[in-house]
Each structure stands twice: as C-alpha cells, then as structure tokens.
Amino acid sequence: MRRALRRAAARARVRDDRGTIAMYTVLFTPIVLMLAGLLVDGGLAIHARQRAADLAEQAARAGANEIDTDALRATGEPVLDPGRARTAACDLLGASGTEVAASRCDADQQQVTVTVEITVKPQILGIIPGLGSFTLSSTETAHPVTGGNGP
C-alpha cells in the first residue's frame, strides 16, 4: 500500500512540472534578446565613437599642416592660413565617404578644430519602439608645431 502511495505521489510531482520549460523559455527569451542587443549595439556605438574621434583627429592634423610660410619666415612662429586649413580639414572628411552624418571645421591662426558626427542604426534594439538611430560626435583640435628634438 505504501508503494502505491509513493508511486502516485511521484506521478503527481512529474505532472506538476509539465510546462515549466516552456514558461522559462517565454520569460527569458526577451531578456536574452535584450542582452544580445546591448552587446551588439553597444559595440556598434563604441566603434562609431572611436571612428568619429579618429576622423576628427586626422582632419584637424591635415588642417594644422597648412602653415602660412610667409608668416613663418617673417616671425619664426608657425601661423596657420585659416582658409587653407579649413579647406584641408573639410576635404579630408569629404573623402571619408558617407559614414559622416555632419561635420564642422573651424580654423584660426593658432589652431584647427573639427567636429564629426556619425549616425548609428541599432541592429537588434532597433526593433523596440522609440530606440531608433542615434548620433555620436567627437571634437578634436590640432595646433601647428615646427622643429623638435628628434632626428
């Protein structure tokens, strides 16, 4: 008699667990998708931020190469030609392709400042309403330098 009761209790426990895996699957699938989205789309955002900083640095350096040679010869100090510096910086950004959403190049006689904006479209989290494209920007500045202690 005890065996029969034990078997009935064991069968009842087995029947009570039916559907548990389905419930966990339904509950945890959205959580796993959110974590995957944060991983993938977060990586895209970090890459876009680094790319914007890289483009801004390169453009600012290109602009800082445009030294006014007449002023350098007359004073011995590196002075930028603002028009040529702005043009050189913006030309380099124009050659980078379509990844730059917006840019701004400013120059005076002492420095070149470049701001680059890159738009990122989320690959996984974009399916959530309200989480569309976002823009990352970076601003870099370069100064003209002459001479040096190296070879």
Image: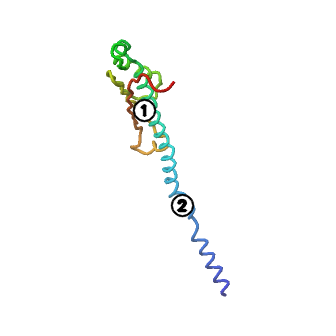
Q: Is residue 109 shown to the viewer in this render? A: yes
Judging depth in this view, the residue of 11 and 139 nearest the camera is 139
Crowdedness near tag 1: few (<14), some (14–19) or many (≥20) residues, C-alpha within 10 Å: many
Task: Determine which residue is flagged by label 1.
Answer: 118
Quadrant in the picture for the N terminus:
bottom right
Judging depth in this view, the residue of 143 and 6 nearest the camera is 143
Residue at the (58%, 69%) spot, across then down: 17
Judging depth in this view, the residue of 1 and 126 nearest the camera is 126
Task: Determine which residue is flagged by label 2.
Answer: 24
**The furthest residue to the bottom:** 1
**The furthest residue to the top:** 70
**The furthest residue to the left:** 108
Residue at the (63%, 79%) spot, across then down: 8
Q: Is residue 30 above or below residue 9?
A: above
Q: Is residue 89 shown to the viewer in this render? A: no
Image coordinates for residue 20, horizontal then vertical, percent: 56, 64
Q: Is 99 situated left or right of 107 in this image? A: right
The amino acid marked with disc number 2 is Tyr
